Image (tube, grey):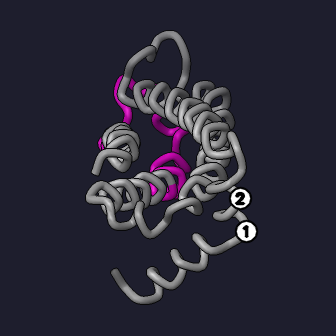
Amino acid sequence: MPEFLDTFLRLLQGSALGQTVRSAPYVYPVLESVHILGIGLLIGPAFTFDLRVLGLGRRAVSVTAAARCLLPVSRLGFAIAVITGIALLSAQPTMVAAAGAAPWKFGLLILACLNVLVFHGGIYRRVDEWADAAMAPVAACLGAGVSLVAWAGVIFAGRLLAYS
């Protein structure tokens, strides 16, 4: 592990946040529960949107209507998951970083976030050109596929952290 990362993790572990999460009764399980709720708010709408981009429900709802309804909920879930995830990590960051699943979780998390930025900064900027098409452009479908795989991988790797 790079020295700067090890130093950061040790600072996080020794912080007031880390000490509180480790020692205060019920803080860790409450954070974990809220984290799972945040993940649900993130992943449920994101997967639904991705499936819509891939063509599911094309006749029922437009891509833009799906985005307008689903993505704000997904952003809220992301914010909740990030805040609670950092708090949970603060309890034992050096142990988490040493787990075999850690590089997978954080690597897939970075991939998923980059995919969101590329999708919304790229092909989605021209959504009006393809929103009513029989099929979304290959770039949009690729982004939706990467999203589905990356976010699912984040969840699997996150659960494996407890066992690796």
Instruction: State the residue at coordinates (37%, 85%).
Output: 2
Category of crowding for the residue at label 2, using alpha-carbon neighbours closer than 10 angstroms: few (below 14), some (14–19), many (at least 20) = some
As measured in the structure, the alpha-carbon distance from the residue carrying label 1 to the one carrying label 2 is: 6 Å
Magenta-highlighted residues = 117-142
Q: Residue furthest top?
A: 60
Q: Position of residue 63 (x, y in %)?
A: 53, 28
Say which quadrant the N terminus sits in: bottom left
Can residue 138 be found in the magenta stretch? yes
Which residue carries the number 2 mark? 20
Instruction: State the residue at coordinates (66%, 27%).
Output: 69
Viewer-proximal residue, 10 or 114? 10
Q: In which quarter of the image is residue 108?
A: bottom left
Prevailing secondary structure of the magenta residues:
helix
Can residue 44 be found in the magenta stretch? no
Viewer-proximal residue, 47 or 30? 30
Viewer-proximal residue, 38 or 9? 9
**Local SS, label 1:** helix
Which residue carries the number 1 mark? 16
Q: Are marks 1 and 2 in contact (CB under 8 Å)?
A: yes
Amino acid type, residue under disc 2 in the picture? Thr
Q: In which quarter of the image is residue 27?
A: top right
| Above or below, comparing residue 152 to residue 5 in the picture | above
